[in-house]
Amino acid sequence: MTLVGKEIAVELKNDVVLTGTLHSVDQYLNIKLTTVQVVNQERYPQLTVLKNCFIRGSVVRYVQINPGDVNTELLQDATRKENSPAVGGTVSEAKK
Amino acid sequence: MFCKWESIVLSIGIIMEEPLDLIKLSIDERVYVKCRNDRELRGRLHAYDQHLNMVLGDVEETITSSEEDEETGEEIISKRTRNVGMLFVRGDIVVLVSPPLRTS
Amino acid sequence: MASTLSEWKSKPVTVLTCDGRLISGHLRGYDQLQNLVLQKSYETVYSVDAPPERIDLGLFVVRGDNVAVIADGEIGRAGGGGGEESDDDGVRAEPIKEIAGNR
């Protein structure tokens, strides 16, 4: 499951919202967007020139995603797996 | 039994060893998330990781802001809400996560 | 998957810093932490009641912690002809907020 190639809106911690096509994400959640547009152009005319950009993961507050682009069942299962205890595996024992 | 912190056995039958196990029980439930800068989120928890990065669905965000009335000097508190269908939340803004009522 | 800056090496870029400033220049170097070396760099200062002001900075290192967004291209690239008015001249804008809580 990937959101690469999908339209997303990245809200930064300074309230700026950038929309665009997700080009790539790395381990730090740095985000690269193409065909960028700034939301509320009247407020941020200086940012309308942006086309392709790299957003540092640490400045991101939210990423708005189109619900249709996400398989929530898959996400939930992956989360349960990823967060099963590394030591002992008590949760899986409890399930038996 | 509940004084012992290592393993608290809940009635559901899942052993809890660390705080995030409580959040694990909230997967696919509606949770309340308090964030920095007077932001609150209510939404269905689809995913999280050890940083508390989260994916929430059907989110209602409430932003509380206070302004001072120019004439009276009184503090006016206003709340704005907005709805987002699917939201990734970066963990570093998360202050607390409250599981649904039934597990408390 | 990797989000590297390699495609922008030696190209003109504009950096939005965590304190809300816009710095443009040629990207001469970078590393994993987004520490950047910008050559022929300049800051563009926008205000509500005056045209954008360009402040030349020369060779600059920006520490990665202070980088918010890196975009390709320079803003108000008046580089072509000296003293020529750039497209950006009419732009009036309030300053961009700083990234709160970015310790």
Image (tube, coloured by chain):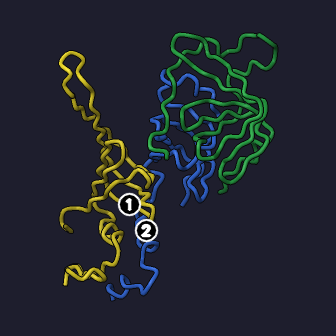
Assign a secondary structure to mark 1.
strand
Q: Which residue is mark 1?
A: B46
Q: Is residue B61 left or right of residue C98?
A: left
Residue drawn at point x = 55 percent, y = 50 percent: A57
How far apart marks 2 and 1 lie (CA) works out to: 8 Å
Q: Which residue is mark 2?
A: A79
**Contact, mark 2 vs mark 1 (Cβ under 8 Å):** yes
Residue C26: x and y in percent read: 77, 34
Q: Quadrant of residue B26 in the image?
A: bottom left
Q: Is residue B74 above or below residue B98?
A: above
Chain under disc 2: A
> Which chain, by letter, is green?
C
Q: Is residue A6 left or right of residue B2?
A: right
Chain under disc 1: B
Residue kind at label 2, given as amino acid type: Thr
Q: Establish whether labels 2 and 1 are both on one chain.
A: no
Assign a secondary structure to mark 2.
helix
Residue C81: x and y in percent read: 81, 14
Residue kind at label 1, given as amino acid type: His
- Camera-side residue: B75 or B15? B75
Q: Is residue A20 above or below residue B32?
A: above
Q: Is residue C48 left or right of residue B70?
A: right
Q: Chain A drawn in what color?
A: blue
Locate the N terminus of chain A by quadrant: bottom right
Q: Chain B drawn in what color?
A: yellow
